[in-house]
Amino acid sequence: MTIETVSTARAFGGTQGVYRHASDATGTDMTFSVYVPDHAPGARLPVVWYLSGLTCTPANVTEKGEYRRACAEHGLIFVAPDTSPRGEGVPDDADGAYDFGLGAGFYVDATQVPFDRHYAMWSYVTEELPALIGAEFSADMDRQSIMGHSMGGHGALTIGLTHPDRFRAVSAFAPIVAPSQVPWGKKALGGYLGEDRAAWRRHDAVALIEDGARVDALLVDQGAADNFLVEQLRPHLLAEACEKAGIDLSFRLQPGYDHSYYFISTFMADHLGWHAARLK
């Protein structure tokens, strides 16, 4: 597997890179960003995965996430994949809506035509891209954690709950915690996976916990002024599921904050410090 370097820049004593490669999982070219702090020759650094939300590319968090100072301080590699396949022939939402199709892969492997040909974001994020990161960067793949925002928070929670032995820490900003119960998720899971509700449950954090998935702890920040809080996010459902399951959920409702990267960047360093403590 070969990668193309799109750009690199120095930042906080490390290297911020943007890269492109031909993906077997999606059948398209995929772009991702990686920040690597300077380190001793031969050293391997822990990896934090960041999954982005609806409409985003890796550029959103790379340009606005304000994570590099904390990653440099803690010695963390920060990897940001794209949110969907892109390119000629990749199907989009029939009406051009923002919440399905391009920029809205929902971190699942689609089974429904025509999306099953390219939309394999679960396999891409959990299998193909980690293999590439482990081979091409100074990454310690025995020390990984995962975080995300909104749709990416959904992805981080479901992937972390499915692979608790791989990810030592899981956190999220304003995650979609129960996609089976909200409009965004019903549209996405139905469109990508069809009407098999058992398949939906495997991509629903609340359902996974109800069905026995466990992690030691979760950290979730949610803006109290988030326009999507009541209809799409419903974090109280995650809190209830974690309480019943005995999962240590640190849920912080942040007064005055919305759904944007102003919110994410404000609490990014807190999350990275929380991850770093668990990745030592």
Image (cartoon, grey):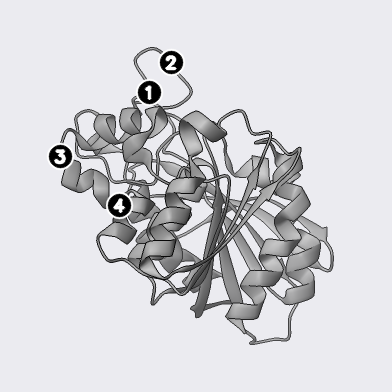
SS state under label 2: loop
Of residue 58 and residue 48, the one placed in the foreground of this image is 48
Quadrant for the N terminus, please.
bottom left
- Extreme residue in the top direction: 95
Quadrant for the C terminus, please.
bottom right
Which residue carries the number 1 mark?
92
Cβ–Cβ under 8 Å for marks 2 and 1: yes
Circle 1 packing at 10 Å, graded few (<14), some (14-19), many (20+), is some
Which residue carries the number 2 mark?
96
Distance, label 3 to label 1, CA atoms, is: 22 Å
- Looking at the rendered structure, the kind of residue marked 4 is Ala
Distance, label 4 to label 2, CA atoms, is: 29 Å
Residue drawn at point x = 26 percent, y = 40 percent: 110
Residue drawn at point x = 68 percent, y = 36 percent: 260
- Looking at the rendered structure, the kind of residue marked 3 is Asp
Which residue carries the number 3 mark?
196
Task: First in sequence, mark 4 or 3: give its number.
Answer: 3
SS state under label 1: loop
